[in-house]
Image (cartoon, rainbow, N blue to C red):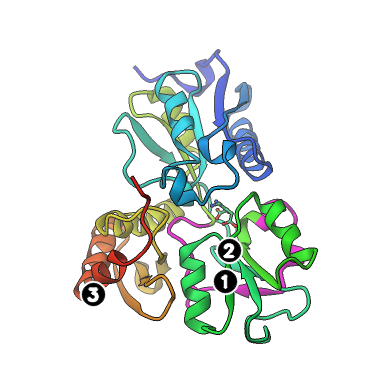
Amino acid sequence: MTTPASARTATLRIGTRGSRLARWQAEWVASALRERHPGLAVELIEIRTLGDRDRNSPLAAIGGTGVFTKEIQRAVLDGSVDVAVHSLKDLPTMGPAELVLAAVPPREEVADALIAPAHRTLEALPAGARVGTGSLRRRAQLLHRRPDLEVVTIRGNVETRLRQALDGAMDAIVLAWAGLHRLGLHGHVTERLAPPRFLPAVGQGALGIECRADDEGTRSLLAALDDPASHRAVVAERAALAELEGGCLIPMAAWGRDAEGGRLALDASVFDADGRRRVHAADSGPVDDPRGLGIRVASALRDRGAAELLGGSIRPPS
Ligand SMILES: NCc1[nH]cc(CCC(=O)O)c1CC(=O)O
């Protein structure tokens, strides 16, 4: 039997990472739930992930995909929380079968953002300028356009990375527009790196809200937060990524969105590590088959040599 929202007495517990961005996102979900379900009690439970405990190692070295999400998923599986709120970008495509992606709320802008206090734009950066990013996808796209830049690996939360550009340790950094906007830090952005010119990561700008697949009560509460257009766009992007057997650590970019004629469109690219080579594919399909579209675009990428490019890219050691 499904428990109607109004009949629920226990507090709905939301598991979140402790970073300011993660807490903002979980708070957003909590207030949206309270708004949709008056009387519902919701609380946040902070969970430390491997990615939070080790702030210095490159992500690829500390276990690759899922370093920000596994512990939160485990808490949902063992019942210590009911709901996990993730940045969808950080959520591996292959998750535990007992969990379901119950809702994808309206997506933020998917663009990346350049913060280059002195030079303002990618074009205007001088040769040899130091640009900080921890993302292979951003690195490859930056070097694809500007092979003369020095791309420097940086890690840390949004605020830590932003400081490195503002205090002059870097000439520029690239971050997701969405995270900066949510934290009210978008005033520092000097150039928007938006598709189709600069393609985002799979799931960028979207939240992924998970719960146990057999928890009908929670599923129906979460369904009220789902935005079907955002949901199908990320399902298409994630299907393409899964089909290429990639995680968040491969230099792949994708951009799904509703397009003209009531169709769903998907662009995707993969790069080699230094951005010299790029393989691109684009297609569209009916809105009710986002997975099919993702798989078609992935096989087009494969036909154009994607596997060969990715074979030479950095992989987690284990
Ligand atoms: N990997 C970290 C991460 N995960 C989600 C976001 C930003 C928010 C989003 O893309 O939804 C960020 C920071 C960044 O890439 O700048």
Amino acid on which the number 2 mark rests in the picture: Thr
Which part of the image, by quadrant, shows the C terminus? Answer: top left
- The residue pinned by badge 3 equals 305
Q: Is tag 1's residue or tag 2's residue first in the polypeptide sequence? A: 2
Q: Residues within 10 Å of mark 2 (few under 14, many from 20)?
A: many
> In which image quadrant can residue 21 be found?
top right
- Percent position (x, y) of residue 164? 73, 61
> In which image quadrant can residue 165 be found?
bottom right
Could you give the CA–CA distance between mark 1 and mark 2, rounded to whole angstroms?
A: 7 Å
Q: Is residue 161 left or right of residue 142?
A: right
Q: Is residue 156 left or right of residue 272?
A: right
Task: From the image, state whether disc 1 or disc 2 is nearer to you.
Answer: 1
Q: Is residue 197 visible?
A: no
- The residue pinned by badge 1 equals 151
Question: Residue 189 in magenta?
Answer: yes
- The residue pinned by badge 2 equals 133
Disc 3 to disc 2: CB gap under 8 Å: no
Q: Residue at 47% x, 30% y: name it.
A: 71
Q: Residue at 29% x, 61% y: name it.
A: 294
Q: Residues within 10 Å of mark 1 (few under 14, many from 20)?
A: many
Q: Which residues are magenta?
A: 180-204
